[in-house]
Amino acid sequence: MRVAVAGTFGPLHDGHRTLFEHALRFGENGVVVALTSDELAVETRHEPRPIPSLEERMQTVTDAIRELDEWDRDVEIRTLETEDGIATDEPSIDALVVSPETAPELEGINDRRREQGFEPLSGIVAPYVYADDGERISSTRIVAGEIDEHGRVLE
């Protein structure tokens, strides 16, 4: 199975690492990591926040994948220019790793894939990762100085 995972991934945290682990575990025919472009990263924020540059995020993701990849997968990191770009435009993708929050978006992605004559994607739902305070780990919380990348409370 060829698996994709997409996101801004900045700053990187243990929730993102869980997404990568799932992609690597199931991606025996390769993994595509789609990193949002700098422009798309800003457009898709519900709340504005500082986001590391694409170059910084690409390096951080590359390092994290290297540390997590115990299967020696073929991993390709691409820039994502539109929200569903790779998931809807890439016929060789078989599955998409999603969080419980983004899982409902898979239905619309599969509708667009079918319109193009592509097979629908399977969804691989990675669980949320929680901080020590019981709340979800998020990049927004890290930037706000509430927690570190592993969910340790900083306040």
Image: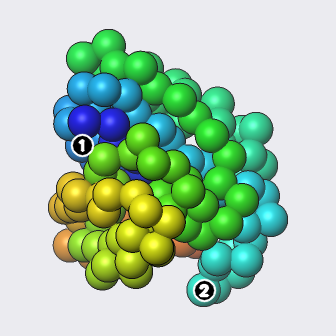
Residue 97 in sight from this viewpoint: no
62 up-or-down from 50: above or below: above
48 relative to 138 in the view: left or right: right
Please tell me which residue is depicted at 31% across the width and 26% down the height of the picture: 29
Q: Position of residue 19 (x, y in %)?
A: 32, 49
Q: Secondary structure at mark 1?
A: helix
Tell me residue 140's x, y (percent).
54, 71
Rendering colour mode: rainbow
**Is residue 69 left or right of 140 when viewed as pictured?**
left
Placement of the N terminus among the 4 image quadrants: top left
Q: Amino acid at mark 1?
A: His
Residue 38 point in image, percent of width and height: 78, 58
Q: Residue furthest bottom?
A: 46
Q: Which residue is drawn at the image coordinates 24% and 61% (left, top)?
A: 123
Q: Earlier in the sequence, mark 1 or mark 2?
A: 1
Secondary structure at badge 2 equals: loop
